[in-house]
Amino acid sequence: MLIKRKSIEQAESSRRPARKPKFAPVTLSEQDGVRYLHFGTEWVQGAMRLRKPDWPELEYAQQMMAWMLFIDAPRAIAQLGLGAGTLTKFCYRQFPEATVTAVELNESVIGICASMFKLPDSDDRLSVLPADAMDFVHDPANHGAFDVLQCDLYDATARGPVLDTPEFYQACHDCLHEGGIMTVNLFGDHPSFSKNIKAMKFAFGHVICLPEVHDGNVVALCFRDRPQLDKAALEAMAVQIVAATKLPAKSWVKGIFSTD
């Protein structure tokens, strides 16, 4: 499945005075038992299998969980860009000891996730914030507050992340606790890819890209601190992840060592 993306909703909030952003319409489609989220185009922004609403249906979403190879008991997780709520729901169910914060600029997306994608109500562990991801990562209250950031910031034109500057990624780095990891969904067949990788490497101690999926999506793992890449230890962790979640963690290890 081709899953492309880019930015119409807001053109880099850091470069322009604050104004009310324009949003593309939030639309839905269904096929073969899977409900898809769109922003008024054919490009998929998220998916949910109706019989398994908490399962990450799309392979790139599964890869966004590859930080689990390195962090087995996160305390605080943040999702930048809610999409269909896939990663937010999975983390909320899978890590009952962790707080989960989702940041989404478009309140219509939050509403559709609650009504059509089974996003749970906010509680003492789950917060869904109608906010700008740029403002969120620059807020000093969030610095050093998270073990994990998951970044999937696309909109209707579908060509690359909405926020992609070195300053943005540095602020993301600052939000991570020691040993923290950020995963980012990129589009490998677009000029934005190299720009994002360069900006990530400016901000983070180490960056690894997993193999491309969906004919375009590439997930990058951004480590606050350079990790020790022990293949045997990661393979052992992958076995545990597969047993506990059925996520394809063994393929993540292969990807890390084929691209590093």
Image: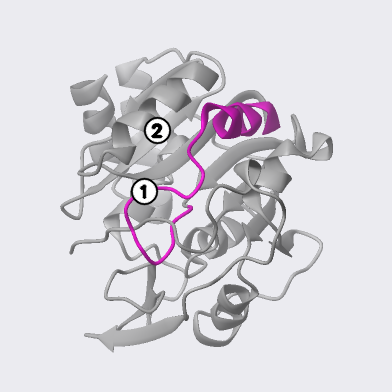
Q: Is residue 172 magenta?
A: yes
Residue at point 30%, 30% (across, down) = 194
* Residue 236 seen by the camera: no
The amino acid at mark 2 is: Asn
Cα separation, mark 1 vs mark 2, equals 9 Å
Q: Nearer the viewer, residue 60 or 52?
A: 60
Q: Residue furthest front?
A: 17
Quarter of the image for the N terminus: give it: bottom left
Label 1 element class:
loop
Give, as a three-letter code, the residue at label 1. Answer: Gly
Q: Position of residue 175 (x, y in %)?
A: 69, 33
What residue is shown at x 55% (from left), y 62% (from top)?
82
Type of colouring = one colour
Q: Which residue is mark 2?
A: 196
State if disc 2 and disc 1 touch (CB < 8 Å): yes
Dot placed on the residue nearer the N-terminal end, 1 or 2:
1
Residue numbers of the magenta segment: 153-175
Q: Which residue is mark 1?
A: 160
Which secondary structure lies at badge 2? helix
**Residue at the spot x=48%, y=53% of the render?**
153
Q: Nearer the viewer, residue 181 or 71?
A: 181
In the rendered structure, the answer to whether residue 22 lies left or right of residue 64 reads right
